[in-house]
Amino acid sequence: MSLSVHLRTDLQTGSPQADFERLVAARAGLADLLTRADDAATADLVIDGAGIALGLPWNDERPPYRFPALPLTEVGLLAACNLALGDYETAHQHLAGQPDVQAEVVLAHHITHGLPVDDDLLASLRVVKEEAAERGRQAHNRA
């Protein structure tokens, strides 16, 4: 099994290649899992200056769930790889301290495995997103 990665360069953020290569080199075995992709539309992961985005699968291996961008960090890359491989439990563990993204992982896990998505799960996702928005608003107003 391998994951395809597309590195996108733009004028504002430049190329993420140096950061990506540093992260891959820092984790044994990660280079063996990842291959470069020329086309962002078919890549499992798309990396640019804004972070790591999971590509939408068109092969019915997992639902086409759009996750928020993950940071271009070791934790972000490991979480993205695990999400792309369908290992939601390990991705959830990597994302400790990021409850907004963890809530997305729980929802995607339920959808993928045909588990019921109840009102409590949706409410918790909404609360986490509202809390994140409020923290962002407060940080903006302090600046």
Image (cartoon, helix red, strand yellow):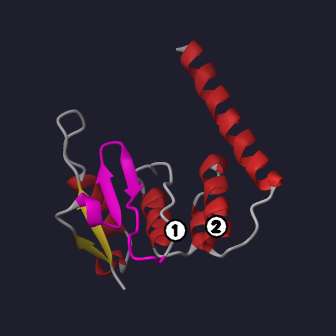
- Nearest the viewer among 79 and 58 is 58
- Tell me if residue 68 can be seen: yes
Relative height, residue 68 to residue 61 (above, below)? above
Q: Position of residue 2 (x, y in %)?
A: 33, 81
Residue placed under numbered mark 1 in the picture: 63
The kind of residue on which mark 1 rests is Pro
Relative height, residue 27 to residue 2 (above, below)? above
- Nearest the viewer among 119 and 95 is 119
Q: Assign a secondary structure to mark 2.
A: helix
Label whose residue precedes the other's in the sequence (1 or 2): 1
Residue placed under numbered mark 2 in the picture: 111
For the N terminus, the image quarter is bottom left
The kind of residue on which mark 2 rests is Ile
Q: CB under 8 Å between callouts 1 and 2?
A: yes
Query: Dot 1: within a 10 Å radius of its alpha carbon, few (fewer than 14), some, or many (20 or more) residues?
Result: some
- Tell me if residue 21 can be seen: no
Query: Dot 2: within a 10 Å radius of its alpha carbon, few (fewer than 14), some, or many (20 or more) residues?
Result: some
Q: Position of residue 86 (x, y in %)?
A: 52, 75
Picture quadrant where residue 117 is located: bottom right
Q: Position of residue 141 (x, y in %)?
A: 58, 13
The residues bearing labels 1 and 2 have C-alpha atoms spaced at a distance of 7 Å
Q: Is residue 67 left or right of residue 32?
A: right
Q: Is residue 137 left or right of residue 70?
A: right
Q: At 49% from the left edge and 59% from the top edge, which residue is drawn?
A: 75
Relative height, residue 31 to residue 111 (above, below)? below
The span shown in magenta is 40-61
